[in-house]
Amino acid sequence: MSVLTLETATRITAQAQSAARAISTAPLTIAVLDAGGHLISLLREDGSSLLRPQIAIGKAWGAVALGKASRQIASDAQQRPSFIAAVNTLAHGNVIPAPGGVLIRDANNQVIGAIGISGDTSDIDEQCAVKGVLAVGLQADIG
């Protein structure tokens, strides 16, 4: 299994930010976590609002913790709200069930981390996350 390094996490972050600037998104916060849910990289653009770091981390952390993209977690929250509420209680409120949290997989399809983005609409957050991961030659898993 590959390990997500600081260098790779920083490159993913930079590529996601570049994708965001290319489409003139609102100011974003971008978090990259390793497979254990530990923060490797965090970028908060000027003008990104107060809770964006926690939201970006929560999107990525939920993806790693549950083994599925935050888009799928959002769908689960609609289909099985009691289950996601219970999971979020166990997670001390750290799971954000909204698109923008994407699993990062290596060439062997192993989860090596996740990226979470917050600041624009959830769909645009997710789009920038996917572009950041793909730009460094890794797989972006949104479900």
Image (cartoon, grey):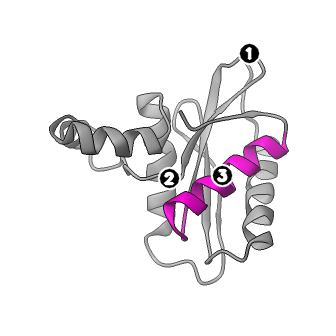
Left/right of residue 18 with respect to residue 31 in the rendered view: right
**Which residue is rendered at x = 58% and y = 30% of the image?**
35
Check disc 2 and report its element: helix, strand or loop: helix
State the predominant SS element of the stretch in magenta.
helix
Queried whether the magenta region covers residue 126, the answer comes back as: yes
Viewer-nearest of labels 2 and 1?
A: 1
Q: Quadrant of residue 16?
A: bottom right
* Mark pair 2, 1: CA separation: 25 Å
Left/right of residue 31 with respect to residue 95 in the rendered view: right
Check disc 1 and report its element: helix, strand or loop: loop
Residue marked by disc 2: 57
Residue marked by disc 3: 129
Kind of residue at disc 2: Ile
The residue segment tinted magenta is 118-136
**Which residue is rendered at x = 68% and y = 57% of the image?**
128
Residue marked by disc 1: 108
**Which residue is rendered at x = 65% and y = 81% of the image?**
46
Check disc 3 and report its element: helix, strand or loop: helix
Residue 91 point in image, percent of width and height: 30, 40
Instruction: Tell which circle, 2 or 3, labels the residue nearer the N-terminal end.
Output: 2
Residue 10 point in image, percent of width and height: 77, 51
* Mark pair 2, 3: CA separation: 13 Å
* Mark pair 1, 3: CA separation: 20 Å
